Image: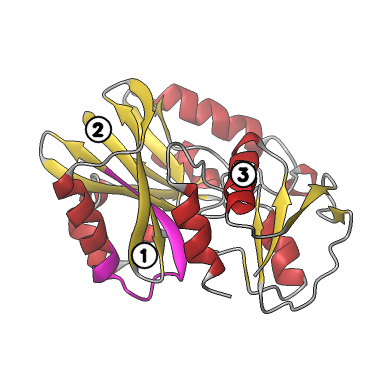
Amino acid sequence: MQWLLQEFEDTQKLAEALDRLEIPYTWHKVVPFVGDLVPTPVVVDPNSVVMFGSYTLWRYAKANSYKPGVFKLNPFVQEQAWHPYLLNGADALFLTLRDLPKHLDDDGREWFLRPVDDSKEEPGNVKSTDEILGMADRVLRLDENEIPNGSLRHDTLLMLTKPVRILREWRVWVVEGHVVTYSLYKEGARVVYRHEIDDDAHVFAQHMVDLSPDYAQAYVIDVCRTEEGLKLLETNCLNAAGFYAADLLKLAAAIEDLG
């Protein structure tokens, strides 16, 4: 597998794991707004290339027919098998940004909001209705031609759900249908990175993977413990997700085996 890395703190950690595994890689910068890589990679086999860095790398991977390149995902809310396990999935509202002013009452209510697509246009977070409507107003004032790639757009589909008290949150890395590694990243309101997962959460995560075996060759799935039990929070693109306290030796080896 040929590894192409964009330099970030997390990819530096990945590079250290690749060094220990004696797997070669090259560093590249991304030209803003254009998306070209500097230096231009010299690719031996486009069917054996993987890229790590910002989410926008998927465009370069697609343009150059790299495989696996970037493991792009379908929106996790489209997976019917997961619906019973989603955090407030049954009560979610799905609205494009342009429809927010027409369908969201400015009543001071708080919502957990995130884009349906795994696009990183807006990180998942809790906002009040006035904050959400203010955000929509700022974007809608712009002509769509003025909005750069990777930013919220008029037609961005958003999911809004009732905030739920989360006790613990884990990120789990999945390759070829198997949980490869994991990390605790939140306890209550505290951000904590530890390489650990509760036994039942590990079983739950693998069960989610088994329920949707054709979802993606590799991805990240975030699961959490609530007062009502274990829930599926979301999925993320493995190539652009933070590593927290994952075992990067195991992750790198699993991805290398794909080549």
Q: Is residue 75 visible?
A: yes
Looking at the image, residue 144 sits to the left or right of residue 245; the answer is right
Amino acid type of the residue that numbered disc 1 sits on in the rendered structure:
Gln
Amino acid type of the residue that numbered disc 3 sits on in the rendered structure:
Glu
Which residue occupies 51% across, 53% down?
Answer: 118
Name the residue beneath numbered marker 1.
78
Looking at the image, residue 70 sits to the left or right of residue 213; the answer is right
Comparing 222 with 110, the one in front is: 222
Q: Earlier in the sequence, mark 1 or mark 2?
A: 1
Determine the secondary structure under disc 3.
Answer: helix
Separation of disc 1 and disc 2 at Cα?
A: 25 Å
Q: Is residue 164 visible?
A: no
Looking at the image, residue 72 sits to the left or right of residue 163; the answer is right
Comparing 22 with 205, the one in front is: 22
Q: Earlier in the sequence, mark 2 or mark 3?
A: 3
Determine the secondary structure under disc 2.
Answer: strand
Name the residue beneath numbered marker 3.
16
Q: Nearer the viewer, mark 1 or mark 2?
A: 2
Name the residue beneath numbered marker 2.
168
Numbered tag placed on residue 204 in the rendering: none
Task: Please provide percent x and percent y for residue 184.
Answer: 33, 36
Residue 222 among magenta residues: yes
Do residues under tags 2 and 3 come within 8 Å of each other at their CB atoms?
no
Task: Please provide percent x and percent y for residue 23.
Answer: 65, 60
Range drawn in magenta: 209-223
Separation of disc 2 and disc 3 at Cα?
A: 28 Å
